[in-house]
Image (cartoon, rainbow, N blue to C red):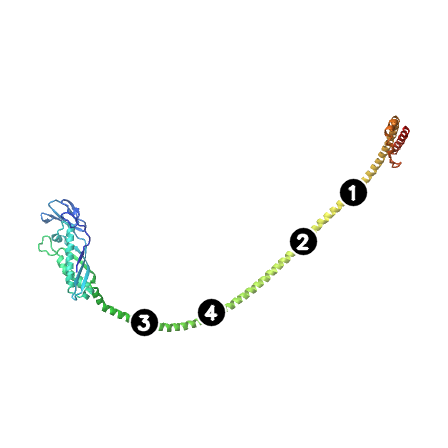
């Protein structure tokens, strides 16, 4: 068995010197002289010549001289967690974890009980003392209770009893000048039992056995009731389902018949609408065909009229062209006849001129021939001996072709023939 006390805050402790192991104090709160100021959650106690001065008060401040005493008493809420274990009247070991909330309600009374010249040390001492009282009172109360009372009536059996036992001890209403005042000036506001634990696991299981058996029985009965309810509900659901199915089938059949009738009516309406639409479409088609035929007929008439007009215009153009061609042909014929006549006339003139020119030329040729014959005779007479000797050998081979007496050069040919005969004769004489 054991106990544990956890103060509201973990404090640092001195590790050396004459204060080794004690909490580290704030230098501003324990200085020998100077200005000391309390926080709003602290009560300043100023003592001069053994009496509390008027400078004391909540959150007050004063100037401390070396021969004076000043203490700062915290008035804020403090919290202590403690653990206590104890054997109950049934010889069963239990462990209780609890929390106590306290505060210093009368700082002047607490200042008389605890030495707040060192505030951290005084606070730690108060926590330890109050925790020890709480643990001892808890053990004492648990020793007079049963396990079930501790487990089920923790508030009324433990917490309230602890408050009733400790409140008169730590509380008080005295004053600094009242030497007979009781209490510490501390008020415990609340004590809460956080957890109760059975230390023996075997005992805990044995304690749970009846409850577990009862719970198992309740669970089994609940399961049976649940199964029965489920079976009953299944049967009801099955019957309701059958009825609902039948009703649904009837409703479905009625709905199907109504849907079929509606579908048939809708189909007839659609067919009527389609027939009307087809009739309207046919009438529209006929009307469009008639309009198209009329338009096509009008277009054909207009086209024929345009073709007739174009043909008449083309015929007129052709007639004009034919008249022009005929006029051109007549002019060309007349021009050809004129040209032919002119050519015929020109050819006659040219022929007459040619004949006259030919006659003149003939006369000139005849005169030239005669002159040539005379000159030839003279030349021949002069050169005849030499010529005879030169050509005497070959003269027999000379051939003279005569084309008739009507040719212009016939006299020349005759002269040549006479000359050749003469040469031949002279040649033969020379031999």
Q: Residues within 10 Å of mark 2 (few under 14, many from 20)?
A: few
Q: Is 418 located above or below residue 292 in the figure?
A: above
Q: CA distance from mark 1 to mark 2?
A: 41 Å
Q: Would you say residue 343 is visible in this rendering?
A: yes
Which image quadrant for residue 282?
bottom right
* Residue drawn at point x = 32 percent, y = 71 percent: 227
Residue 407 is labelled as none
Between 362 and 312, the one lying in front of the other is 362
Q: Quadrant location of the C terminus?
A: top right
Between 100 and 111, the one lying in front of the other is 100
Question: Given this view, does label 1 or label 3 mark the residue nearer the observer?
Answer: 3
Which image quadrant for residue 292?
bottom right
Secondary structure beneath disc 3? helix
In contact (CB < 8 Å): disc 1 and disc 2: no
Q: Which residue is mark 1?
A: 336
Q: Is 227 located above or below residue 420 in the figure?
A: below
Question: Given this view, does label 3 or label 2 mark the residue nearer the observer?
Answer: 3
Residue 25 point in image, percent of width and height? 16, 48
In contact (CB < 8 Å): disc 4 and disc 3: no
Secondary structure beneath disc 2? helix
């Amino acid at each position: 068995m054991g106990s544990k006390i956890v103060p509201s805050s973990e404090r640092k402790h001195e590790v050396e010197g004459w204060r080794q192991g004690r909490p580290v104090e704030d230098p501003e709160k324990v200085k020998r002289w100077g200005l000391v100021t309390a926080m709003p959650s602290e009560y300043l106690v100023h003592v001069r010549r053994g009496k509390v001065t008027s400078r004391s008060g909540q959150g007050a401040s004063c100037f401390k001289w070396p021969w004076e005493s000043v203490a700062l008493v915290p008035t804020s809420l403090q919290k202590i967690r403690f653990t206590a274990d104890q054997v109950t009247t049934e010889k069963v070991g239990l462990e209780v974890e609890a929390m106590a909330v306290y505060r210093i309600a009368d700082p002047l009374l607490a200042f008389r009980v605890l030495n707040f010249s060192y505030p951290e040390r005084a606070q730690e001492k108060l926590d330890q003392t109050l925790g020890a009282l709480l643990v001892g009172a808890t053990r004492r109360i648990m020793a007079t209770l049963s396990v079930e009372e501790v487990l089920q009536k923790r508030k009324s059996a433990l917490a309230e009893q602890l408050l009733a036992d400790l409140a008169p001890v730590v509380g008080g209403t005295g004053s600094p000048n009242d030497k007979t005042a009781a209490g510490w000036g501390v008020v415990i506001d609340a004590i809460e039992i956080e957890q109760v634990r059975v230390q023996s696991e075997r005992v805990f299981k044995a304690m749970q056995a009846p409850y577990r058996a009862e719970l198992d029985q309740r669970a089994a009965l609940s399961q049976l009731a649940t199964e029965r309810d489920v079976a009953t509900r299944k049967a009801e659901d099955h019957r309701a389902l059958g009825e609902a199915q039948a009703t649904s089938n009837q409703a479905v059949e009625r709905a199907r018949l109504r849907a079929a009738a509606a579908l048939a009516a809708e189909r007839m309406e659609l067919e009527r609408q389609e027939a009307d639409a087809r009739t309207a479409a046919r009438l529209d088609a006929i009307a469009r065909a008639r309009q198209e035929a009329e338009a096509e007929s009008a277009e054909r008439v207009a086209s024929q009229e345009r073709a007739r007009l174009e043909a008449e215009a083309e015929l007129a153009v052709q007639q004009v062209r034919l008249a022009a061609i005929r006029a051109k042909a007549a002019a060309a014929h007349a021009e050809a006849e004129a040209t032919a006549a002119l050519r015929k006339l020109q050819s006659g003139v040219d022929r007459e001129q040619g004949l006259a020119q030919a006659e003149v030329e003939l006369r000139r040729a005849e005169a030239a021939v005669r002159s040539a014959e005379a000159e030839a005779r003279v030349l021949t007479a002069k050169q005849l001996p030499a010529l005879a000797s030169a050509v005497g050998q070959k003269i027999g081979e000379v051939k003279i072709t005569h084309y008739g007496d009507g040719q212009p050069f016939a006299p020349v040919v005759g002269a040549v023939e006479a000359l050749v005969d003469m040469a031949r004769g002279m040649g033969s004489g020379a031999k």
